[in-house]
């Protein structure tokens, strides 16, 4: 594929992003026809975020270089059915010009959660109210990797200036809509503030990617009728969420609420603490939902719902949701659990559609982690009536009969799946369990959590893979395995321990071996692996909100995960990611590091925007659609962060202490759905330990559950610069313990220094452990085979057949008068200082290929803090130096080759969206 298309966004992709972003907007309140703004109405728009509009959260998940961005003000100006109070808009634009967006200096985790708001006067607002009857107050928030929200003003809560703005606007406007351009749900206690007139409309538009401004304007203007539904419960205060009490710990985060996450908790124990329920969302039109009796067939329950648009003006879409209520039994169950959902097409007034919603009976089973039913480590249906409810939110539902009965009757305890104890907690704690029920509300009681009883040493020993007898090179290449001329075992048996150890290392970031500026490369990272055995070098790029290429190459930025979940539209999400797959293919990228599918356990998690929902079924269905789409488009998706990444604070150390039941039913369920229904073939583990074992070396997570139970056949990679501890003993963690990583069947360490994988620059212990008998050759061969199977099916296998490209030739300039006299002379080698944004001139005496070596540092003490810059010669970018936090320590790295002509060159370094790097010198040498 021509490299001329690298950095060229896919045609038509942005338009579909706009449609998806509009479909995910959630209308929570709409009194007095505040929205839409239409029929030539004039609207006054308040809040700086109308112009400084957020596209995505921060960190690696949102760092996409876009060809353009949209904002709400300019998008509203393009709507021909409304008018903007331009006098007010001009005042905001002038003030924003004088008070530019604060990105915190652009450093890692430096951007604040919110922006300084423009002060408004009584006179300004009063004058605006004389020009328009309606007001929009646009508020924004952002957070991301390495930076959770905090329960502070300007963070999770509105600050004083925002509250004053709302008070002032509602004093003079009787119709005020609050537009929330946020990553996830925020504190909404501002609705309780005393004001002369109430807020009459609330619209969550989330972060909609590069087309977010246009999409929000589509909804506000009535071009699109809102059809999004909340993917998370909004309660009255942060303290109402049961996880808040344990969120943010530095060493451990105890999941005491157990399976009672989000609406599962509120519908069971605290329905009065819900401001807006899960699945709720209004429309500009009205719908009727007529339900039919449910039927059982072939192990499934099927419900029919007839949905009709009963409005008179607006076309719209509606989401029908099916919930079940299981008997409490011995295990204890939530009052409601989502079983299925479906969304209508666009229905004109008077038009109707029949929806068919089907779900497996077995999906109503619960996991017995303590043997309470006599069936430990099994999914069971306890005796009793499983009632089915259907409606348009977890609250707005009606019961349906099942084949003439009140629900689905289970006559006696039924085991639906027999498993084995895995990843159970080692620490004792008390988890939440329903007690007595009064008026539909359950008493909170506690239950001692079952702790681990299985010997990991025995489990690992019993499942040890066979060791292939080393044969040395027999001339078998990976393509021969692909063509089924040779077996994978025969191929892997050729590799030496040193070659195998190289194969389980990835390089990055911004490797010169693959598409410039992406997160990593892996595969044939030595001459022998590449040339003797034909193992190609694959590329992985950060996501999930689009392709991150730190060199400035452009890509399409899609709406965030939170928004996509609110569409409740898996077909739309799949089609959106078909286009993402095509854009990945165009950019020669073999896997996108996404989707993110952790659970929204608490609103403060900074990375919630990368994830979908508080509900595991909705999360899993969205993830499966995402993965299927990317694969249909021609590339692959790496689901992350496996598992329990529920906070960013101390994310590499905080131990997720969680019951096996909660782990399986809530935190792993979406990953399981993505494997079984999405065909996932790549997983990234999380930084944190789960029950004392770091995810990157957690045997039960990576082998027992993922591969043995779910049948996963792909690769598992670490998150970047992860740490591991002993698979059996646990204990202290380190980046060097790749032997534990390999033993757990986490195949690939991401990442070591570029161009250095075969030299073991990190000093990992793979070969040392092999020599001491602490790791078997068979275990290492197993990981190598997993990696090679992935590579065989990746786009890179086709690219690998193309001739290897020579180093890029950068044209020289002719002599440049006075400047030429200042140029350094490059003969065999030359080293010179390279301050950022300054031009360094040098003359090449002899044309040829030159190696490049640089020395660089950053002042950030966080090892995982990322920074990069672009290096150009005569205005042509030829490499992207990248570095983690080194706390001021200088690092020397080889950067690859460049082809130079005889003549003059102007070297210049410029910062990227990840500033903070200092390149102290560049050296060109032969």
Image (tube, rainbow, N blue to C red):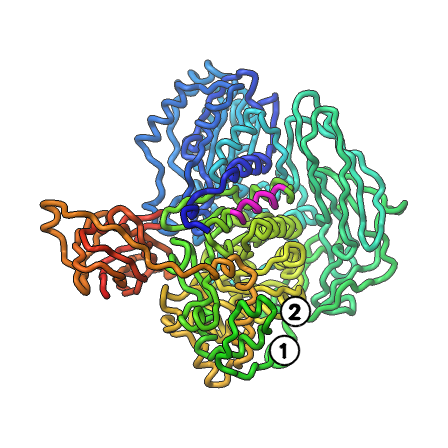
Say whether residue 512 is visible: yes
Left of 694 or right of it: where is 351? right
Q: Is residue 785 above or below residue 388?
A: below
The label shown at residue 708 is 2
- Using a 10 Å C-alpha cutoff, classify the residue at mark 1 as few (fewer than 14 neighbours), some (14 to 19) or many (20 or more): few
Secondary structure at badge 2 equals helix
Q: Is residue 127 above or below residue 752?
A: above
| x and y percentages locating residue 830 in the rendered image | 18, 62
Q: Nearer the viewer, residue 208 or 541?
A: 541
The label shown at residue 463 is 1
Please state the extent of the stretch shown in magenta in the rendering: 572-582
Q: Quadrant of the C terminus?
A: bottom left
Say whether residue 148 is visible: no
Q: Residue at x 45, y 77 (%)?
A: 766
- Using a 10 Å C-alpha cutoff, classify the residue at mark 2 as few (fewer than 14 neighbours), some (14 to 19) or many (20 or more): few
Label located before the other in sequence (1 or 2): 1
| x and y percentages locating residue 524 in the rendered image | 45, 67
Q: Is residue 137 above or below residue 207?
A: above
Q: Residue at x 53, y 16 (%)?
A: 40
């Amino acid at each position: 594929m021509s490299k001329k298309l690298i950095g060229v966004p896919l045609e038509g992709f942005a338009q579909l992003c706009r449609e998806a972003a509009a479909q995910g907007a959630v209308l929570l309140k709409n009194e007095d026809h505040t929205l839409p703004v239409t029929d030539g109405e004039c609207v006054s728009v308040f809040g700086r975020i109308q112009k400084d509009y957020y596209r995505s959260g921060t960190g690696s998940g949102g760092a996409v270089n876009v060809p353009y961005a949209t904002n709400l003000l300019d998008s509203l100006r393009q709507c021909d059915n409304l008018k903007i109070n331009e006098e007010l808009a001009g005042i905001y634009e002038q003030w924003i010009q004088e008070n530019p967006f604060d990105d915190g200096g652009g450093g890692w985790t430096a951007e604040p959660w919110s922006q300084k708001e423009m002060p408004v006067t009584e006179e300004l607002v009063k004058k605006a109210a004389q020009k328009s009857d309606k007001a929009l107050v646009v508020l924004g928030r952002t957070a991301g990797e390495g930076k959770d929200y905090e329960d502070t003003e300007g963070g999770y809560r509105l600050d004083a200036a925002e509250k004053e703005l709302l008070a002032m606007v509602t004093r003079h406007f009787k119709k005020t809509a609050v537009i929330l351009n946020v990553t996830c749900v925020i504190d909404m206690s501002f609705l309780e503030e005393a004001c002369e007139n109430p807020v009459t409309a609330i619209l969550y538009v989330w972060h909609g990617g590069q087309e977010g401004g246009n999409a929000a304007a589509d909804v506000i203007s009535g071009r699109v009728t809102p059809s999004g539904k909340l993917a998370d419960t909004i309660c009255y205060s942060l303290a109402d969420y049961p996880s808040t009490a344990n969120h943010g710990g530095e060493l451990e985060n105890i999941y005491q609420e157990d399976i009672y996450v989000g609406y599962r908790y509120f519908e069971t124990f605290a329905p009065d603490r819900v401001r807006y329920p899960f699945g709720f969302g209004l429309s500009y039109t009205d719908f009727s939902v007529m339900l039919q009796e449910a039927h059982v067939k072939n192990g499934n329950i099927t419900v029919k719902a007839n949905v009709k648009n009963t409005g008179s003006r607006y076309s719209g879409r509606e989401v029908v949701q099916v919930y079940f209520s299981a008997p409490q039994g011995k295990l204890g169950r939530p009052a409601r659990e989502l079983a299925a959902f479906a969304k209508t097409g666009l229905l004109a007034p008077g038009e109707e559609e029949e929806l068919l919603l089907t779900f497996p009976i077995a999906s109503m089973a619960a996991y017995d982690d303590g043997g309470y039913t006599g069936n430990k480590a099994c999914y069971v249906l306890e005796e009793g009536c499983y009632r089915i409810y259907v409606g348009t939110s977890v609250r707005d539902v009606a019961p349906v009969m099942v084949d003439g009965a009140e629900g689905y009757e289970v006559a006696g305890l039924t085991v639906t799946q027999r498993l084995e104890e895995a990843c159970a907690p080692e620490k004792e704690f008390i988890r939440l369990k329903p007690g007595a029920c009064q008026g539909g509300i359950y008493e909170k009681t506690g239950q001692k959590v079952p702790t681990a009883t299985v010997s990991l040493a025995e489990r690992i020993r019993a499942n040890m893979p066979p060791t292939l007898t080393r044969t040395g090179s027999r001339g078998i290449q990976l393509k021969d395995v692909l063509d089924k001329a040779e077996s994978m075992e025969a191929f892997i048996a050729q590799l030496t321990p040193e070659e195998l150890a190289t194969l389980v290392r990835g390089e990055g970031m911004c490797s010169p071996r693959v598409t410039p500026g992406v997160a990593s490369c892996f595969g044939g990272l030595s001459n022998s692996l590449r040339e003797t055995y034909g193992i190609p070098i694959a590329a992985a790029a950060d996501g999930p909100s689009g392709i991150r290429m730190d060199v400035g190459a452009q890509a399409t930025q899609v709406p965030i995960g939170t928004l996509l979940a609110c569409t409740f539209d898996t077909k739309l999400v799949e089609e959106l990611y078909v286009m993402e797959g095509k854009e990945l293919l165009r950019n020669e990228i073999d896997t996108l590091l996404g989707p993110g599918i952790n659970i929204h356990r608490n609103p403060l998690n900074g990375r919630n925007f990368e994830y979908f929902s508080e509900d595991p079924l909705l999360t899993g269905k969205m993830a499966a659609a995402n993965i299927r789409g990317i694969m249909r488009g021609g590339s692959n998706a790496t689901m992350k962060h496996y598992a329990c990444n529920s906070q960013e604070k101390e994310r590499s150390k905080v131990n997720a202490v969680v019951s096996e039941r909660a782990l399986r039913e809530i935190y792993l369920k979406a990953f399981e759905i993505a494997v079984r229904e999405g065909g996932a073939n790549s997983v990234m583990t999380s930084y944190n330990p789960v029950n004392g074992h770091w995810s990157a070396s957690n045997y039960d997570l990576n082998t027992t559950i993922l591969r043995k139970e779910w049948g996963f056949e792909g690769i598992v990679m670490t998150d970047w610069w992860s740490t591991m501890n002993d698979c059996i003993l646990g204990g202290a963690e380190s980046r060097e313990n790749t032997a534990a990583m390999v033993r757990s069947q986490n195949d690939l360490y991401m990442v070591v220094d570029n161009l250095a994988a075969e030299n073991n620059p990190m000093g990992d212990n793979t070969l040392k452990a092999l020599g001491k008998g602490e790791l078997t050759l068979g275990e290492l061969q197993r990981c190598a085979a997993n990696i090679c199977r992935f590579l065989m099916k990746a786009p890179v296998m086709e690219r690998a057949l193309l001739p290897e490209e020579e180093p890029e030739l950068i044209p020289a300039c002719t002599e440049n008068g006075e400047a030429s006299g200042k140029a350094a002379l490059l003969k065999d080698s030359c080293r010179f200082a390279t301050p950022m944004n300054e031009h360094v001139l040098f003359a090449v005496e002899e044309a040829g290929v030159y190696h490049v070596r640089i020395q660089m540092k950053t002042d950030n003490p966080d090892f995982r803090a990322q920074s990069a810059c672009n290096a150009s010669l005569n205005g042509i970018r030829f490499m992207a130096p990248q570095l983690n936090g080194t706390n001021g320590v200088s690092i020397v790295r080889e950067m690859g080759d460049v082809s130079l002509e005889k003549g003059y060159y102007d070297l210049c370094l410029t910062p990227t969206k990840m500033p903070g790097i200092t390149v102290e010198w560049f050296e060109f040498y032969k």
